[in-house]
Amino acid sequence: MKKAVSIILLLVVIKSSYAQDSTHVDSAGTGTIFVNKDPRLDIIGKKELEFNTMGMKAAKGYRLLVMSSNDREKVMSVRAKLLQQFPDQKVYMTFQAPYIKLKFGNFVEKPDAEKYRDQIAKARIVTTNVYVVPEVVEVKPDKNKDKDDE
């Protein structure tokens, strides 16, 4: 009795292992697949490609370390002054315990960073020294430059 049950069980397992029948052909018989998609997906794909190729690039450059303090109110005040006086530049805040570091700008060339450092010193936004530090910065590609290459 045990042998019969085990043989039947073995046959069921072997039969179930052949889950796909190779003689079965799809109902169309051609083996082709039709995809119905929204044509707006192509537009989105093109926009994403344009964004990825023309978007922000990273490069070695410089930023200004304007201040490093554990007084959040003071850092936020200096940040607001920088954004008001230089709206075309970005301001970055990072927290490295226990200090908040305030960095300014994306400069590819060191003389550009030094020019802004002098402007910040003349405006007396901060009373401490402003340092030019090397960092990976965001670089906007020039769209006119690509058109000239064509």
Image: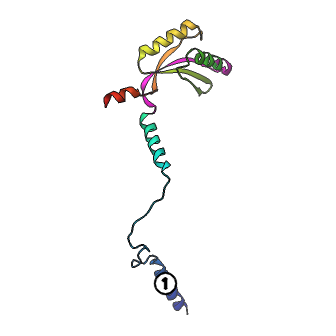
Residue 11 highlighted magenta (yes or no): no
Main structural element of the magenta stretch: helix, strand or loop? strand
Image location (x, y in percent) of residue 116: 49, 13
Image location (x, y in percent) of residue 6: 52, 87
In the rendered image, which residue does mark 1 sit on?
10
Name the residue: 61% across, 19% down: 79
Among all residues in the image, which is located at the extreme top?
Answer: 122
Name the residue: 52% across, 20% down: 89
Among all residues in the image, which is located at the extreme left?
Answer: 150
Label 1 element class = helix
Front residue of 49/72: it is 49
| Colouring method of the image | rainbow
Quadrant of the snapshot with the N terminus: bottom right
Name the residue: 54% across, 11% down: 120
Amino acid tagged 1? Leu
Image location (x, y in percent) of residue 10: 49, 84
Count up the numbered dots: 1
Front residue of 32/23: it is 32
Name the residue: 48% across, 79% down: 16
Image vertical order of residue 106 relative to residue 40, above or below: above
Within 10 angstroms of label 1, few (less than 14), some, or many (20 or more) residues?
few
Q: Which residues are magenta?
A: 55-74
Residue 58 highlighted magenta (yes or no): yes
Image location (x, y in percent) of residue 59: 41, 28
Quadrant of the snapshot with the C terminus: top left
